[in-house]
Amino acid sequence: MREDRSLGLPHTHLAQVVSTNDVLRELAENDAPEGACVTADLQTAGRGRFGRRWTSDTACNLLLSVLLRPRIEPGSVGVLSLLSALAVAETIEDVAFLRATVKWPNDVLIRGRKCCGILLESSWSEGTDAPPEYVIVGIGLNVNQDRFDSEFSGQATSLLLETGQPIERQAVLDALMDRLSERYRSLVAADADAVRSEYLKRLEGLGREVDLRHAHAGPVFSGVIETVTPSGGLVVRLRDGSLKTFVAGEVTTRNAAAHDATYHDTDDLRD
Ligand code: BTN
């Protein structure tokens, strides 16, 4: 453990929970400090983005939530999404020596297959422009799972499947807390640009045409990804030549249609 690690403590590990995000929310409401972390071997109702489920075999993977109390503008919370995905990608390289990429905003992929999903949930004081009271970063990182439901076959992967070797979950958690602490510290020190530029180097679809999908019925936008904004929005040059910034949604990259096909939105795309 690095001496300058600031996130990951106090750490509560539980055998079974509904969702680690729920357990941490309860702790946050009872004044848990920034950095508090909850992990579990099993979630009975793990949540994904857009109301999807997040499932995981028991005691195989990392299912964790970390508490942040960032003093940032409300409009900048999206950068925490980029930061978390970047930290996970860096961790994968640290522990498994594999190149990991990110799919906006915060999926982490190895060879085009998703090995990690991240769900940020924030609490806001009503009617103010104040920073969030807290942000919960929920991370599901597939470590030692050796098969996935047919629903996800060809689209999901794990460190074990990619390396052929089991990896100790504690070692992955330690490396992740180091990376997350490092990136978060640089953000707090007002160096959001470092996160943004490193994120862009790993961004799937940068400079290529992608589809951005609305959750329910509604338009699908097609365009070329130009960049991400300092607050985490995705800037896309639409086919009519106009620029559009998306703050939420889901990207389908054209040459990765196979691994994107079953990740359906069930939520609204704000733009
Ligand atoms: C996604 O890709 O849709 C996000 C998945 C996030 C899953 C993690 S597992 C730990 C934490 N607890 C939850 O209920 N969800 C997140």
Image (cartoon, rainbow, N blue to C red):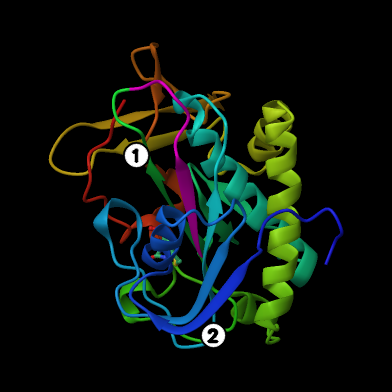
Q: Which residue position holds label 1?
A: 249
For ligand 1, give the image quadrant: bottom left
Q: How crowded is the residue under tag 2: few (<14 C-alpha within 10 Å), some, or many (20+)?
A: many
Q: Position of residue 48 (x, y in %)?
A: 35, 60
Instruction: Identify which amino acid the numbered label 2 is placed on.
Output: Cys
Q: Residue at x 76, y 70 (%)?
A: 95
Give left or right: position of 11 versus 254: right
Q: How crowded is the residue under tag 1: few (<14 C-alpha within 10 Å), some, or many (20+)?
A: many
Between 32 and 88, the one lying in front of the other is 32
Quadrant for residue 170, please give it. bottom right
Q: Residue at x 31, y 25 (%)?
A: 271
Regarding mark 1 in the picture, which secondary structure is present there?
A: loop
Instruction: Identify which amino acid the numbered label 1 is placed on.
Output: Gly
Q: Position of residue 126 (x, y in %)?
A: 29, 30
Between 4 and 193, the one lying in front of the other is 4
Residue 208 counted in the magenta span: no
